[in-house]
Amino acid sequence: MEDIYTVYKGVLFEDSIRNDIGKENVSVCRLLHFLNINDIAQHVENNHYSNKDWHFRYRISSMIKLTVVKCFRDLSFNKTISSISDEEALLFHFVDDNGDISLPTGATLHHFIKYRLGKEGLQYIMGIIAERIIKLTKDKDLKTDSTPLEASRYDKHSDYNPHYGCKMDKAHITLIGVFPLYMTYTNGLANDSPEMDKHIAFLKNYNICSDSYALDSGYDSFENHADVWYYLKVAPTIPPKCNAVINREGTIERINHWVNKLWKKGGSIHMPIEKKLELLYENGRKQQVGMYLRNQTLIDEKFEEKKKTRQPIERSNGHIKGRVTFDVRKIQKDSRELYSILRFVAYKLMILANLQNKIEKIDLARYF
């Protein structure tokens, strides 16, 4: 926990997040005041702004934090600006050259989110935050699951999902421990399994030393088993579908058969099983690798115990929805993906603020 020193109208102010520990009601701006996102702001400046000086009237880091306030307080753009007190404006450094408070308009905040950041900018920020969370947490268990983004029952653009009993779009979320890392957006009837390629591609960039990767049966496919094992170096915990059976091509005899046929590429039946699977995966036998891995799941007597590692994901998704409004009501169809990602990133930034300041028990309910 670092102290922050601020000079306002010639007076030096010292502040620390320690001052908020134990308080029941704290402004979310206080939390974000102690969040360091200078590198993220620099990227936005370098990649999402032109070189005209007038584009930099407000600090980019301050504008990003203001978007978090909008999502957390669930207000319109204009009401978000109206909700910022003078003290909160000072925490975000909304001060002009004369030392007077100068807040952006609601239209300026809207323009910043939709036309400056956009989906591409928010996805970049999502990745940077994920990288930091991975470094700051001791958790090593990965999880992926989908959760509904509820729409109005009268919505013409969202599908009715009979499983959830509502019209909805869908968010596919990957967590490490209880901390969210990555999210993709689809329509409400999209299958979960095809989204795995994006999540695996995202995770493999960070060389995560994972203990487990838990998913539900919606992700049960030979390709998903093989891809998770090959790229993330962990056997996935995926409950087999009700009609799953031991597949002959996934037995050790058939594995050895195909490894032996690849002898010109170094294949040998005396290789460790991990090397055999790597060889097969890299030579067009991905499905067979997945068959072997799923066979191991079917015969694993401890699998029911391993499935319990997935249980916290429902609570984590519920916690996200409890802190930011995570639905697509009253949002135009073309903007739904953007604002869903925005709310997800806003939640991650609040989590990151706690982790950066080494706050072990994260309680976002006390903020307003």
Image: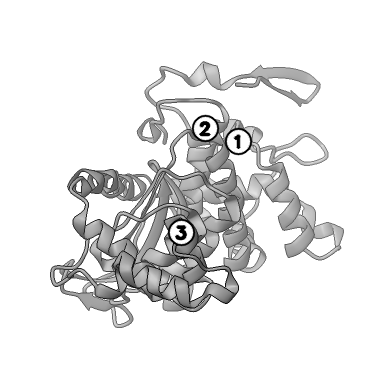
For the residues labelled 2 and 3, say whether their Cβ atoms are less than 8 Å apart. Answer: no
Looking at the rendered structure, the number of numbered marks drawn on it comes to: 3
Is the residue marked by circle 1 packed among few (<14), some (14-19), or many (20+) residues within 10 Å? many
Quarter holding residue 99? top right
Say whether disc 1 or disc 3 marks the residue closer to the N-terminus.
1
- Badge 3 element: loop
Give the amino acid at mark 3. Answer: His
Quarter holding residue 194? bottom left
Which numbered tag is attached to residue 355?
2
Measured as percent of width and height from the top left, residue 268 is found at 49, 65
Question: What kind of colouring is applied to the model shown?
Answer: one colour
- Badge 2 element: helix
Write the residue at 37% across / 73% down.
Answer: 288
Give the amino acid at mark 1. Answer: Leu
In three-dimensional space, the C-alpha distance between marks 2 and 3, rounded to whole angstroms, equals 47 Å
Q: 311 above or below 285?
A: above
Measured as percent of width and height from the top left, residue 243 is found at 14, 72
Mark 3 = which residue? 270
Mark 1 = which residue? 35
